[in-house]
Amino acid sequence: MLRWRQFGATTLLTIATATMAGCAAQSPPANRFTLPEVESPPSSTVSVSSRQLTVNPVEVASYLDQEGIVMQTSDIELNAANQNLWAEELGHQLTRQLRQSLSTELSGMTVVSAAQGGAGAQRLSLSVDQFQGRYDGRALASGEWQLHDGNRLVMQRHFEVTRPLDDDGYPALVRALGAAWKDVARQVAAGLRTAPIPTPAVD
């Protein structure tokens, strides 16, 4: 009887192990997404300007700084996907698309990366505290942006944009998040148009 019990326990353990291995082997490959690309302005509309804007890397909240696309499942619960992932770091995507969108919106200004910015350029910093799908069927992007001229804070604004999803699933969510981010860029551009012109450096 003892031998039968030992055999039965061993058999169950073997079956359980094989089942788990089979489930792991059958796991579907992860889906990877990028935000929709921003259309570049036609070369004929691009003007050379002495006014330069440096766009610093976008900072994202720590819970967004991961591969999994985040869903807000209730007013207090968040879930990062295991099979639906960003193909590139979210902060890098947001920075690049913000810079491209501002180049389109601000034709009278030269928009450059932090590595390319000159000493006299105004600096745009942007932090994102929400960039996720929401339980009410909308995509949400919120945070804050600041404009500095040297060490002086010129402007500071909060932003919050929501966009409805056109369909179920992560592809629709990523497209809605991309549209929300374009709206954020338009809001930032509108604010920058009213910003004072930077003071020329005095030798």
Image: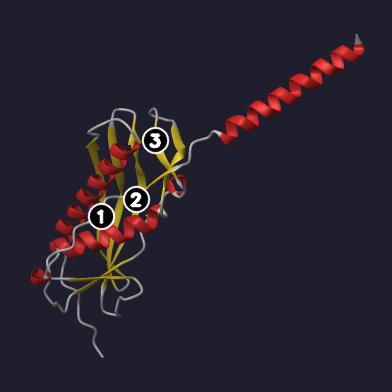
Taking the image as drawn, is residue 194 in sight?
A: no
Frontmost residue, 160 versus 7: 7
Label 1 sits on a secondary structure element that is loop
Q: Which residue carries the number 2 mark?
A: 34
Q: Which residue is mark 3?
A: 71
Residue position marked by numbered label 1 in the rendering: 37
Q: Quadrant of the C terminus?
A: bottom left
Work out whether residue 139 can be spotted.
yes
State the CA–CA distance, disc 1 to disc 2: 8 Å
Residue at the spot x=30%, y=74% of the render?
150
Q: How many marks?
A: 3
Earlier in the chain: of badge 3 and badge 2, it is 2
Disc 1 vs disc 3: which is toward the camera?
Answer: 1
The location of residue 88, given as percent across then percent down, is 41, 54
Q: Amino acid at mark 2?
A: Thr
Circles 1 and 2, Cβ within 8 Å, touching? The answer is: yes
* Amino acid type of the residue that numbered disc 3 sits on in the rendered structure: Met
